[in-house]
Amino acid sequence: MLRKLRYGLIGAGNNAVKKHLSNYAQLSNVDLVAISDINIEQAEKVAEKFNIGKVYKNYQDMINEERLDIVSVTTPNSLHAEITIYALRHGVNVHCEKPLAINSLEAQRIVDAKNASGKLVMVGLNNRFTNAAIYLKNLIDTGYFGSIYKINTGWVRRSGIPGRGTWFTNKEVAGGGVLIDLGAHYLDLALYFMGMPEPKYITGATYQNFAHTTTRNRNGYKGKPNGIFNVEDSATGFLGLENGSTVHFEFSWASNREEERTFVEVLGTKGGANLVNGKLKIQSELLDTCVDVIPVLNDNIKFLSEFEHFIHAIENNKDVLAPAEHGLYLMNIIDTFYQAAESQEPVFFNKNIVRLLS
């Protein structure tokens, strides 16, 4: 019988508790050993809730003293690279929340450290693990839709700013605004469905129209009325690929629209699909007639399956579904989009970015 994997959490915020701890706690082959957070009172509160015996203010001390097999990194984005690289150099596998790093240079450092360590890094791209996404990806890979020539994707909110003056709205800490926050999920999903193709050029625009108000804050995010807000609250873009296909994307924390919506629209030469708010519908033809098909799938179980997958990969020395290389690929595209938006001109990618995946 395999021994339990020793687990530590770095960063004890809401996402850490709702996503990481709540799911790792359900796995019988994982032992919740320790928590680290600079807010020691918050860490102690979370540790008590999950019956975790050790609490640290310094993550280095936790890693050095607890002989951990795995850590979750759920800190602000600017700390992802520093912490992940330290853990890897000390022989610890890392489950790092998205984005992998604050920019592609730091993401590359993580990939280099991962390769040198022989350990695993998985990025928290949890939307890859929904039943609908798994089913749709399998259909695409079988050629059911023919050649995929375009995907439209996005996550748009009416009122969803994660608190003015929180680290989310500080470019130095977050790396960007809604694109690096919400956009990382659904831009990734579109590119994942297409097989992580080589990008050719990108263009688009960013907007900051709701920074002056707190009425568009998301529930639970109070923020500071006079805090820093130097990132975009909306972004839209167009990505051209070397194979001739395209991706059109739109993301917003706040906008004057009817309701929040997530979507991936897949357009192929033989069929298409819409994944809207987690529900999948397939468009095709049958006997010379257009038909819609709604697959009967279980409800969203993305969170737990993500964690089970990572533990299985560690125990069996397998590759992960969302490796560090995919996080680096995504950050290259996000970085280049920000360059294009700032210059108001299309920006062409360096050739062979897809080599990052090999």
Image: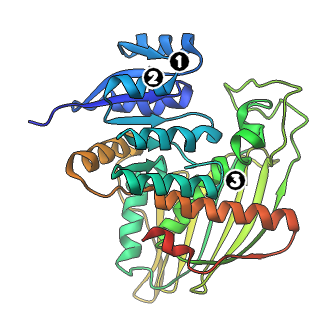
> From mark 1 to mark 3, how far is it between C-alphas?
31 Å
Q: Nearer the viewer, residue 234 or 201?
A: 201
Q: Nearer the viewer, residue 37 or 123?
A: 37
Crowding near the residue tagged with mark 1, few <14, some 14–19, many ≥20 C-alpha atoms within 10 Å: some
Question: Mark 2 or mark 1, which is nearer to you?
Answer: 2
Crowding near the residue tagged with mark 3, few <14, some 14–19, many ≥20 C-alpha atoms within 10 Å: many
Look at mark 1 in the image and give the residue it sits on.
57
> What amino acid is labelled 1 in the image?
Lys
- Which mark, by number, is residue 179? 3
Judged from the image, the secondary structure of the residue bearing numbered disc 2 is helix
> Which residue shows up at 66% across the image and 25% down it?
220
Classify residue 129 as left or right of residue 13: left
- Which mark, by number, is residue 61? 2
> Which residue shows up at 60% across the image and 82% down it?
245
- Marks 2 and 1 close (CB-CB < 8 Å): yes
Classify 110 as above or below 56.
Answer: below
Judged from the image, the secondary structure of the residue bearing numbered disc 3 is helix
For the N terminus, give its image quadrant. top left
Question: Mark 3 or mark 2, which is nearer to you?
Answer: 2
Q: Is residue 31 visible?
A: yes
Residue 90 in picture, x, y percent from top left? 38, 38
Q: Earlier in the sequence, mark 1 or mark 3?
A: 1
Q: Nearer the viewer, residue 32 or 181?
A: 32
Crowding near the residue tagged with mark 2, few <14, some 14–19, many ≥20 C-alpha atoms within 10 Å: few
Residue 287 in picture, x, y percent from top left? 39, 88
Classify residue 142 as left or right of residue 162: left
Residue found at the very far left of the displayed protein: 1
Q: How is the image coloured?
A: rainbow
